[in-house]
Amino acid sequence: MISTFLLFFVVTQTSGGMNEKEVVTEKALYTISDFKKPGGLLLPRPMLPLDSLTGVKERKLSLQISNLSEEYYKNSIKFMPVYLRVPVSRSIAVSTIKIEVPLPPKKYGVKKWSLAVFGPRGEVVRQFEGKGYPPRYVTWDGRYADEYIIPGATYSSILTYIDRFDRKRNIIGSDIKVPGIKGKIKDRYILKMVADSIFIKNTYKLRTDSRERLDEIANFLKEHIFGMLIIRVKGDPGELLSKRLNVLYNEMLKRVPVDPARLKMEPVYFAPEDLKIATVEVVAG
């Protein structure tokens, strides 16, 4: 629940010995404490993407200005508008998956075709089809049955086509695998990534290159700050899972100006039929 405070404005006028008072009540979205974080972050900078492209340029330019310079000159190098700022960190979570289609020989022609995408257990999770010769690529948002593909898991594809002699042929396509996926299901925004992209395998210690992944999660939370905020870490029950949750919680509070009570951390345990792939899932909305 976002903290609120009331602003009261009192206007007093004296006319003919009578006092007239007008009270205006406004409801604020945030308190200053919501945005006051280590490092002196204040509105509106906390909501900008972490390590933004223009932010890097601003820092470089500010270093060229003497500390004795007037604040006016330092402020003059600010790049505006703020909504054009773009995070520098490369995202590993994709919103569309480009699937290469195995192309059949042209000499036999193609009447119609279908490309089936199979999950790690052999189930069909997506199917594309068309008439004539198939395209070189098809795109997929990675979603099926109100769920997204599992980052780090291997999905396969098979092209089935009918040639001009009415012969049915199959061609095995290339494997499909992504380290992260993001999108929207109903009214909730989802970000999923492999836990090993953040933590050293089988530990709760952060990888040396984990900063980009942590910034990616933080920017995702900032983008959807007004909704529910949940981070789920999947793994086996035990101390490792608990410590991973705690590390992520503390890292996000350093990066995102949010009331700690609004950031919910949830452990998710492997079911017997699950693939043993530890993941981090962020839900907002």
Image: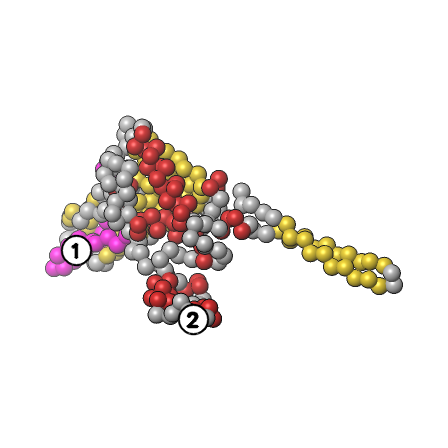
Q: Which residue is mark 2?
A: 69
CA gap, disc 1 to disc 2?
64 Å
Nearest the eye: 55 or 103 = 55
268 within the magenta span: no
Number of labels in the image equals 2
Nearer-N-terminus badge (1/2)? 2
Secondary structure under the numbered disc 2 in the rendered image: loop
Q: Residue at x 21, y 44 (%)?
A: 156
Q: Are marks 1 and 2 in contact (CB under 8 Å)?
A: no
Q: Residue at x 32, y 37 (%)?
A: 244
Nearest the eye: 205 or 179 = 205
106 within the magenta span: yes
Looking at the image, which residue sits at the far front?
Answer: 68
Alpha-carbon neighbours of circle 1 within 10 Å: few (<14), some, or many (≥20)?
A: some
Residue 30: percent from left, percent from top: 55, 50
Q: What is the span of residues highlighted in magenta in the rendered image?
A: 97-122
Q: Determine which of the numbered discs, if any, sits on residue 230 in the image.
A: none
Residue 80: percent from left, percent from top: 44, 68
Secondary structure under the numbered disc 1 in the rendered image: loop
**Residue 69 image-quadrant placement:** bottom left
Q: Is residue 144 visible?
A: no
Alpha-carbon neighbours of circle 2 within 10 Å: few (<14), some, or many (≥20)?
A: few
Q: Which residue is mark 1?
A: 103
